[in-house]
Amino acid sequence: MATKRVNGDLPAVDAHQLQRAFEIVIKRQPQSITWRTQYADLASPVLNDPSLAVQQWRQALQLSPDMSAYSRFLAGYLINTHRGQEALAVIAEAQALQPALRNDTALLALKTKATQALNEGAPTH
């Protein structure tokens, strides 16, 4: 339902009701990557709260059993959805948690792409 709301397919669903639902389910299942990523995906484009989105992306990243692959996936997804600031936050978090990722060529390329998009004024959140 959250994905449909983010995509505009369910405009009648109140975003703040979804937010409350996510807060409840995350409180009950704090280790769920799925709930945190869906909440993050709702937070920035629908709730206009990029800081909440970044908080949830970071939590999801920390819960991932394969942080390097997941950080690449998240950063790529965020760049493709014009959310460069969030992508940079995910990359920074991954590199802080696993310093070896500071030399990861894929993450460095994604970081460059996100930075270029921001510098060119591409719409990012």
Image: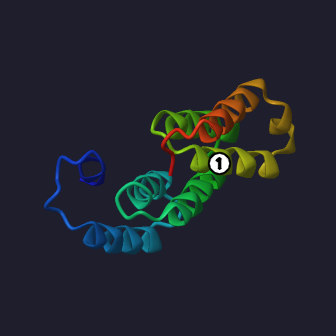
Q: Position of residue 59 (x, y in %)?
A: 60, 59
Q: Residues within 10 Å of mark 1 (few under 14, many from 20)?
A: many
Q: Is residue 73 left or right of residue 18?
A: right
Q: Which residue is mark 1?
A: 90
Instruction: Name the element at disc 1.
Output: helix
Residue 23 quadrant: bottom left
Residue type highlighted by circle 1: Val
Q: Is residue 22 left or right of residue 37?
A: left
Q: Is residue 65 left or right of residue 22?
A: right
Q: Position of residue 16 (x, y in %)?
A: 29, 72
Q: Position of residue 47 (x, y in %)?
A: 37, 64
Nearest the viewer among 125 and 62 is: 125
Q: Position of residue 15 (x, y in %)?
A: 27, 66
Residue at the image position 66 percent from the left and 54 percent from the top: 62
Q: Is residue 35 above or below residue 104?
A: below
Residue at the image position 48 percent from the left and 40 percent from the top: 82
Residue at the image position 79 percent from the left and 45 percent from the top: 95
Nearest the viewer among 23 and 112 is: 112
Residue 117 quadrant: top right
Q: Is residue 99 left or right of residue 36?
A: right
